[in-house]
Amino acid sequence: MRLIEGVMYRNYAPKDGTDPDRITFVQVDADKCQACGACEEVCATGAIQSINDDEIHQVVDPVACMNCGQCLTNCPYGAIYEGVSFVDELFEKLKDPDTIVVSMPAPSVRYGLGECFGAATGTYVGGKMHAALRKLGFNYIWDTEFAADVTIMEEGTELIDRVKEQGEKDARPLPQFTSCCPGWIKFAETFYPDLMPNLSSCKSPIGMLGPLAKTYGAKETDTNPKKIYTVSIMPCIAKKYEGIRPELTDSGFSDIDATINTRELAYMIKKAGIDFNNLPDQDPDPVLGESTGAATIFGNSGGVMEAALRLAYEVLSGEKLNDPNIKVVRTHEGIKTADINVPNFGVVKVAIASGLKNAAKICDEVRAGKSPYHFIEIMTCPGGCVNGGGQPLDPEIQASLFRSTVAQINRRFRARKIKA
Amino acid sequence: MKMKRRSFLKACGVMTGYAVLSVNIASEAFAAAMSFVASRQKSVYAADANPKIYKFRKSQNNPMITKIYNKDGGFLHDGPCGHKSHELLHTEYIDRSAKLSALKAKGYKLNF
């Protein structure tokens, strides 16, 4: 075990072929658990429960856990640890002259990473992040944001195709759900498998960048794809599950070799003695690096929707979208719905939800055949990836012993009321 | 019911807590957490709207996207959702509900 940015990590990098459903990505340290129940309150599926009379909590089985890590980021006692960490393996690969290490950071990482180096919450550090990755020894600074742009092209086109084919034989159903969020995908596969035909068949941006790196990227840079080691850098814990999905081998190799999160990247930068705050801003390498504003907003709840609408509007109407701000789909928490008027087409009905309890409400509606929407975006973490389980912790949650004590009192009080 | 020493101390804690506090701290903590998220969200939209960070705001305007989907020799020349895309960029999903049913059969209570 090792402490990384306030969170304990087990040094365990699963080998190719390990069944991700058998791995515990998030677990409670029973010795540190104070039985306050904050984790149980934020867990949508009920995977984390008290297991004895002292109300010590545990994730009861990895099958029930969507690996979102909201329990971890909301635990006032730092009692929840991560079960998978590729940090040691990655340091080895970075040292190996025969391995071509490729960076693939998600949009949200650049809005969280700075906090580990003293910056204010949300400070954008994209340029410094690219510079730090170069300093760490990554051979190619490619960026998941580029793949987010590819995702919009693929997922937007899929949506337009689905809308067009309604009424035809074998038409794929509407609404179409987004498929970027690994917690949501596992949730749908586990709890709503009957809705799998509604999921966009698009891989997530990282699921696309892995195989693009080992095919297109290898070709463009004249690199032997066998030597490429792709590193997914995410604001997320569930992406570690996605990274080892056995079906993600379309490049002919394992598409994603390692997954780390924002906290682990900060740890590696500190461990390598890099003076992050004084780094110059640098761009990614262009082949699989250049990106747009549409890609960066993937990190927010409502962002994928807005980015997709920026494409769908222009394709469906044949007109230019003058103002790319589609603020009506931006959402802070909960469920949001909107009607978008597209000239020469009609109304596109959309819904956006974050948090799996909200997702379940929407899924029930779709299951009942009562959903009026064309396109639905779901994110597991409230507010989106910027609030992901792999992001730097909110200092408020652990800082105040007073507040955590109160949380415990509240919990006890409620438990008493129920029993009485 | 006989009260153990530990439960007695906890009950005292509950009473003291509620004597001192008149507001619902749990919801206040939630609001604080969401303002933390809001700062990050705001920064994301600011970067999207900042031409010094992102020259383009629509995926279809990214020059590298134009290049990869170029009809003449682009890597994905058959376009979005084309043959090559389906090979590399699309996937299928796996029904995991049997694993869930097995877990429920063991007696675990879950929310859905």
Image (cartoon, grey):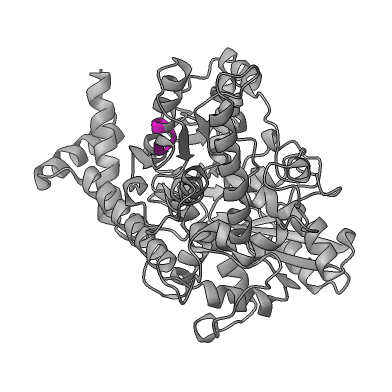
Nearer to me, B39 or A14: B39
Q: Nearer the viewer, residue A262 or A270?
A: A262
- The magenta span reads A349-358
Q: Examine the rendering and report whether any part of residue A104 can be seen.
A: yes
Residue at image location 46% in from the left, 25% down from the top:
A363
Name the main secondary structure of what is drawn in magenta: strand
Please tell me whether residue A381 belongs to the stretch shown in magenta: no
When the figure is inspected, residue A158 is found, relative to residue B96, above or below; the finding is below
Q: Is residue A227 above or below residue B9?
A: below
Picture coordinates of residue A393 (x, y %)?
43, 58
Q: Where in the figure is residue A299, as x and y percent of width and height?
A: 48, 54
The reply to whether the magenta stretch includes residue A351 is: yes
Residue A182 position by quadrant: top right
User: Residue B57 placed where, x, y %?
Assistant: 48, 62
Residue A49's place in the image compared with A183, above or below, is above
Image quadrant of residue A70?
top left
Residue shown at 25% from the left, 17% from the top: B1
> In the displayed structure, does residue A67 sit left or right of residue A71?
right
Q: Residue at x 62, y 20 (%)?
A: B97
* Residue A106 visible, this orientation: no
Camera-side residue: A324 or A240?
Answer: A324
User: What percent of the width, then of the height, locates residue A13?
Assistant: 73, 52
Q: Give whichever of B82, B8 is nearer the camera.
A: B82
**Drawn side of residue A8 relative to residue B49, left or right:** right
Horizontal relation, residue A185 to residue A319: left or right: right
Could you tell me which residue is drawn at 54 percent across and 49 percent down?
A81
